[in-house]
Each structure stands twice: as structure tokens, then as C-alpha cells.
Image (cartoon, coloured by chain):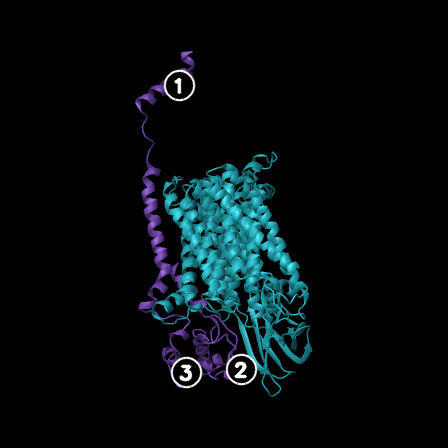
Chain colours: A purple, B cyan
Amino acid sequence: MMRLAALLVVLLIASPAAAVDPGERLDDPVLEERARGLSQELRCLVCQNQSIDDSDAPLAKDLRVLVRDRLQEGDTDAEVLSYIVDRYGEFVLLRPPLRAGTVLLWLAPFIVLLAGIASVLVYVRSRRPEVAEAPEPLSELEKARLEEIVIARDPRTD
Amino acid sequence: MIAEFGHFVLVLALGVALVQAFGPLLGMPFNAAFGRLAVPAARVQFVLLSVSFLALVYAFAVSDFSLSLVTANSHSAKPLIYKLTGAWGNHEGSMLLWTLILATFGAAVAFFGGNLPDGLRARVLGVQGLIGAAFLMFLLFTSNPFLRLDPAPFDGNGLNPILQDPALAFHPPFLYAGYVGFSIAFSFAVAALLEGKVDPAWARWVRPWTLAAWCCLTLGIAMGSWWAYYELGWGGWWFWDPVENASLMPWLLGTALLHSAIVVEKRGALKRWTLLLAIFTFALSLIGTFLVRSGVLTSVHAFAVDPARGVVILGILVFFVGGALTLYAIRAPALKVEGLFAPLSREAALIVNNLLLTAATVAVFVGTLYPLALDAVDGSKISVGAPFYNLTFVPIVIPLLLLVPFGPMLGWKRADVLGATQRLGVAAAISTIGLAAAWMWQNDGPWGAPFGIALGVWLIAGAFSEIGYRVRLFRGATVAEAFGKARRLPRSAWGTAMAHAGVGVMVIGIVGITSWRVEVIEALAPGATFDVGSYAITFQNVESYQGPNFRADRGSFLVERNGKEIATLTPEKRVYPVSEMPTTEAAIYTIWVADLYVVLGDPTGTGAWTVRAYVNPLVPWVWIGAVIMVLGGMISLSDRRYRVGAPVRARNAKPGVPA
């Protein structure tokens, strides 16, 4: 199941996009593909939560061209990202980097999930004996009463 | 004059809300008669706020520019429908609508709640009145819609042109009906804590309200997403925008609440957890209102940016949620724990559902608010976008979806997991066929996409396996017998199956659009022909025309498939002179299993235009799925057991019609 999850994550990251101009495109389809991928990881600085791949803003276009320039210079994907982060700050990354300040951001959902699972297990464990437990044996008084009823109903005693 | 009347009535509504709140909440311990104030007060409040809201709509309809709100948000050249919807297309008006919907729900409890115990009903309405009073004060003191302008200007400043759209015009009312609807669950939770009693009857009263709110919220979110898809012009349908997240959070937790309330109703277990969910769901609705209304997160939707208002909403949030949680801390431990169950049972399955939904809510919550918190703590600015949610939200939701079909198959208390798995064999087989079909159909999509399709098929087939099992289809029953049984199944069973199948349809849509989109971006001169997917498109021409309140360039594209003409698409670029804002109107041709989506871009200066064309496979299913979910919810809502008058009417049901 985790493998399937991981795999669906991979496919959902590779989502397509919109605002690229025909003039910006690189001739090398492999480089262009990488440029599109990187563009989806970078935030348009003047827009609201839009990637530069989606944005019509001129600044987004400048960044897209910059990404492609770096790729043509032979940068790896990581080098392109760090080049841009050096100039524009972490704010451009739509996937916040994992560091001391963002550990909680990345882990909170999973901490809550694990804590939830743990408390449910504790809860279920604490309740299980009650489920399995046989009813308490009858007291002497109850036995006597039961006997009375059974005898009262027994046709032979009529 | 009418505006003054609306203003006056609004002040009156505040007074009535205070009576509705303090009568039952403070007065009842002294004299039960105070509790009886709640019902008439709720009715009067509804009437007063309706009148006030209509007065505002009237001011917009006749373009009364002596109201500063109308001047700021309307224009005489606007079509009448957008003048009317403009009444809530702004901060003040939308908050008035918020309070009106709150009062509507209150009046509905007063009206339909005849069989609620008097004390409970009075307390529910009291809490409802208190929320109403808080928001009416907020409205009157920080966001009064009825303020006059002297001298009145000759014309208004228009409405954001991007908002002049039918889906968007009706998106806020549904969204608010969802947000505010959860206030009823909250009020019921607080009333139950005040009374110190939560029983299955309580859950039966809460469920229909929660379900109604959930349906509205689902529809509201779907409308917003649909609007973004066709209006924003880049064909995306969900952007993880903070304002979208603000509506998704209460939806996720509300979905959890819907499921946990079932456990309270059927088994009397999970009481405290359900109370907590009711409190937090409404808290997230308030947070959503806060995020959107305060403009604390700048976003495409945030047309109100005023920190002072944000602080007041935050105060309201802290008061109600803090108060409710304090009450919870005092009273909840005294609630009797009931309803034993084994680790493998439907109760346990619903707990897993709740856990995963809660974790998914947390992912959206931290993603939305963490950047703000981090900025406040160490001044560093980060962005959280789709890549984050793909790594956190998605892996939490996928196991949830995989497990959905098991839920209804498991028995209460102690389930036969092996049997449930066997009963899902047919669904698993169908889903495998779906996987194989998608695998063979796709040429160059991501290799995980067929698994996504299989997941969607699994959800749909799994949903109907439960129905099939219950009517004993293929297990000795003839078709006629099965049909007869199917007709007698409770509507809630059909509703559950529909809603779960709707999720499956939506999953298929999401996988389709994210995996197999075909894109063509070209600079083209009129007369050029290009291919996108299996369509051949001819760019015929561009002509300019003058709309009622905008200028537009309209492109004309002839679409052919297999040599046959099938459509002419006319995407537009519009400019609204009042605000000098350009908008794109994408042209969409849908064949239900895919959309052809064409956008006219800018002229390149050499006689050519930038043209973007996409084939978006399966994307309509995203919204069709949402609509099926809502229909499922409505069918469930019509089940006589959950009708608002449930316990009494069910007993009076006609003989021969099992409830």
C-alpha cells in the first residue's frame, strides 16, 4: 500500500500547466521537460500561491526564462533551484525545504496520525478485556431466585 | 429610506439575538419560562435579517449610490443579475448573508425541532443566538453595510469583473450555508455539554443538520473549483490557495463528524470524540471566515483587507471555541462511556476514517497557517504549494480511499473481515479490469495513473457491492427479488453508496486531468491549423466587439475530429473599462469524458496570437463526482429515520414500509 501511495504521489506531482509562451520554449525536449518540472516548484513572486508555470505575470516569465538559461548552461535541477533561491530567497520554493524551522510543518500531519493511532490502540486495548470477560457469576441470592423461577415454571411441580 | 429601514431592522435583530441567547442560557436555571423565549426569538430574528438583507439587495438593484457599499461595489452599467449578486460579492454584504444564513438555520431548528426536548432546543437556540449576536455586533461596529455617502457619486466603482460570473455569484451562499450549517452541530454539542447528556437520540438530531451543511459545503467548494477552472484561464481546478484550503478544512472535519455521529447514534460510542469534532468543525468554519475576511492571507479571493476586522473575528473565534473547549474539559469526563466493540468492527473502521480525515485536515491546516506562524516567529518567509500537499495530504488520503469500501461491509461490534473481503471480490475484480484497461489505453502517461483509475473504480464498485450484498444479488435471489429488496433498502444505504461512488468518480477525474493532459501552446496567425490530441483546430479569425460593460476580442476556432466538424469555439479576452482589468474567457467543448479547452492569449505584434489549447481528459468527472456526493447526501437526508422530526415520525410511519 505504501508503494502505491508513493507511486500516486509521484504521478500527482507531475501535473501539467498553462502560461508558458511559445517563444520561451527550448528546442531540446528533454531540457524543456525539466524546465517545466522546475517551473512547477517555483512560486510566482507577485502572484498568490501560483507557480511560475501557471502565471501570466511578467516576473514569472522572467523566472521561466532564467530557469531555461540555467538549464542550457548545463546546471542540474538542484543547481538551478539553489541559483534562484540565492537570489530570491526560500520564498520562491513551493515545496518548503526541510530545516529546523519547517520540521513541524512537514511532520505535523504524520505526528497527529501516529498519535491518533497510538491513542486508539491504547483505548481499544483498555476496553478489550471488558468485551472478552464472561459475565460475573451469579450470587447466592440470584441462584436461589433463579431456582425459584425455574421450579415455579416447571410443569411437574404443578 | 429603505436602506435606513434595513439598518434599523439590523439593529433590532441584534437585540432579538441577545434575547435568544441570554434568555435560555442565563435565565433557564431561574425560570423555565425564559427558555420558551428561544423559539419565537429565533423566528423573529430570521424575519428581521431577511428584511435587512432584502433592503440591501434592493439598494444594489436600484443602484443607490448614496450607500458607500453600493458605490464601492456596483456600477449602473452592470447587468441586473450581477447587481443583485453584488450585494454579497463584498465584505459587508457577505457578512450580512452569513448572519442571515445563521438565523435561517436557527429558525429551522425552531420550526422543525418540535420533538426536541424543550430544554435542549432552548439551549441549542441560545448558543445559536449568541453566535448570531457576536456576528451582528461585528457587522454593525466594523462592517456596516448601510453607511451613507454624502454627496452621492454619479456612478459606482464597479465589481471586480472576475467575479461577474454565475458560478461565482452563487458560490458564496452555498459555501456559507455549509460553514454556518456546522454552527448547528456546534450548538448541539455545547447544549449537550450544558445538559451533561449525549445519547443516540442526540446524534439522530445532529446528523441531518450536519449532513445538510455538508451537502451545501460540498456544492459550494465544487462551484468555486469549477469557476476557477473555466474562468482563471489556465485550466487548473484546485490550487491549494489558502482560501480554498479554508473551505476544505471544515469539509474534511465535517466529513469525519458525519461518520462519527453514526457511531454515537447506532452504538452510543465515540461520544466525546464526536462532541470535540463538532466543536472543531465549526472552529474551522470560523477560521475559514477569519482567513478570508481578514485578508491575513493575501489571495485571489481576499477582496477585503482590513486587519481590524480580522482581530474581531479572531476574538469571536477565541471566545466560542475557547468557551466550548473549557466546557468540554469540565463536562466531558462525566459522560458515560458506552458501546464496546472489537478492534475489527465497523466502529473501528469509522475510527480509522476519522483518524485519517483528521490527519489530512492537519496537513491542510499547517500548510495554510505555518508560513504565517514562521514569519511571526523568526521572520523567514516560506511558501507552501502543491508539491507540499502532494507529499503530505495525498499519502494520507490514499489509504483512506482504499479502505472506504470496507466500512459499510463490516458489522457493528465485531466484524468478519475475511467475509467482508470476500464480498468485495467482485469489486476488486472490476477494479483490476479498470487497471488493465487504463494501462492499455494510455500511451505515455505516468505509470502510476492506471492505479489511480483502479482506485476510483474500486470505490465505485465497492460502493455498489454493499447494495448488491444487501439485496442478495447473485446469492440465490432472483433479479425480481433483489429488485424488491433494493426498493426496501433504507435510503441512507443508497445515500452512502452514492456518496462513496461519487468520491470514486471524482478520483477518476482527478487522475485523468493530472496525468493525461495534452497541451499545445503556439503563436498562430488566423488561418492556421493545428492538432491537439485527436482534434484538428483551425484558427479562423479574431474580432472585437463591445459588451454591456466590457470590450472584448473574440477568437473563432473551428474544431474537427476525424474530418468532421464538431464545434466552433469562441474564447475571448475581455477588458472591463471601469476597472481596466483584463479577463480571459476560455472556450470549453466537453464530451463528458474530456474537455477541449481553448484560450486566446495576447497578440504577438506580428499579426499572430498566442493560442493555448488543451485536451483535459476526464476533468468533468471531478465536478460530476461532487454532484453525485451531494445527491447521495440528499438521499440520505430524505431517509425517514434522519428527517428532522425523526424519532416521533418514524414511529408513526405507515405499516408495511420499513423505516
Pointer 2 and pointer 3: residues touching (CB < 8 Å)? no
Q: Residue furthest bottom?
A: B606
| Distance Cα–Cα, label 1 vs label 2 | 93 Å
Residue highlighted by disc 1: A149
Q: On the image, numbered disc 3 is attached to which residue?
A: A71
Judging depth in this view, the residue of B471 and B75 nearest the camera is B75
Q: Which mark is residue A22?
A: 2
Q: Is residue B503 above or below residue B441?
A: above
Q: Amino acid at mark 2?
A: Pro
* Mark 1 element type: helix
Tell me how far mark 3 sits from mark 1, CA to CA.
92 Å
Q: Chain of mark 3?
A: A
N-term-proximal mark, 1 vs 2: 2
The N terminus of chain A: image quadrant? bottom left
Q: For the residue carrying disc 2, how many other residues have a C-alpha within 10 Å: few (<14), some (14-19), or many (20+)?
A: some
Residue displayed at 56% across by 37% down = B650
Determine the secondary structure under disc 2: helix
Q: Picture quarter containing residue A126?
A: top left
Give percent across and percent down for residue A91: 40, 74
Label whose residue precedes the other's in the sequence (2 or 3):
2
Q: Position of residue B178 (x, y in %)?
A: 53, 55
Q: Please give the chain letter of the residue carrying mark 1.
A: A
- Identify which amino acid the numbered label 3 is placed on: Leu
User: Can the viewer see residue B297 in this picture?
Assistant: yes
Q: Is residue B569 left or right of residue B400?
A: right
Residue B212: x, y in percent? 55, 50
